[in-house]
């Protein structure tokens, strides 16, 4: 019985650690890296030919049809600016991107008239 209680306690601790103080889960859903800004999750998926920014506001995707965003990628001494455009339920750009592990990225834009800035470090 003590073993069961210990395993249960470990499971609950892991669940709490995966969520923040407001009960939001900040795990990546698309294989990217997540940054939380004012209770909104931004997930950046960066590949050499595709950059995607997913947005979740309390688990729901806001209307991105009129959103605009710019992404700055800093890989070592190289800087690249990328314009992200709405594509369905995400913001996206296609092209050629230098995104090795350790690349720093800053996304700035507006969604529903509200400005945001989200910072990431790629893994």
Image: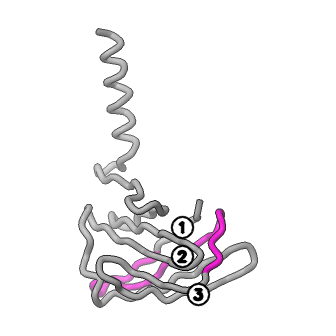
* Quadrant of the image containing the C terminus: bottom right
* Image spot of residue 58 (x, y percent): 26, 62
> Is 43 included in the stretch rendered in magenta?
no
Element type where label 2 sits in the image:
strand
Q: Which segment did they paint magenta?
A: 97-117
* Image spot of residue 22 (x, y percent): 29, 52
Observer-nearest of 31 and 117: 31
Element type where label 3 sits in the image:
strand
Give neighbour class at mark 1: few <14, some 14-19, many 20+ (Cα, 10 Å).
Answer: many
* Image spot of residue 113 (x, y percent): 29, 87
Q: CA distance from mark 2 to mark 3?
A: 10 Å
26 lies above or below 86: above
- In which image quadrant can residue 121 be found? bottom right
**Which residue is the extreme one toward the right?**
77
Q: Dot 2 corresponds to which residue? A: 106
Q: Is residue 3 left or right of residue 120?
A: left
Q: Dot 3 corresponds to which residue? A: 81
* Image spot of residue 69 (x, y percent): 43, 85
Q: CA distance from mark 2 to mark 1?
A: 6 Å
């Amino acid at each position: 019985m003590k073993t069961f209680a210990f395993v249960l306690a470990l499971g609950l601790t892991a669940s709490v650690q995966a969520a923040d103080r407001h009960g939001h889960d900040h795990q990546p859903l698309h294989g990217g890296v997540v940054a939380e800004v004012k209770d909104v999750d931004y997930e950046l998926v960066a590949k050499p030919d595709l950059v995607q920014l997913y947005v979740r506001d309390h688990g729901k995707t806001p209307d991105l049809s009129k959103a605009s965003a710019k992404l700055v990628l800093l890989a070592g001494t190289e800087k690249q600016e990328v314009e992200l455009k709405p594509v369905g339920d995400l913001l996206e750009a296609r092209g050629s991107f230098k995104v090795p592990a350790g690349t720093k990225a800053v996304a700035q834009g507006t969604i529903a008239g509200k400005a945001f800035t989200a910072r990431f470090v790629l893994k």
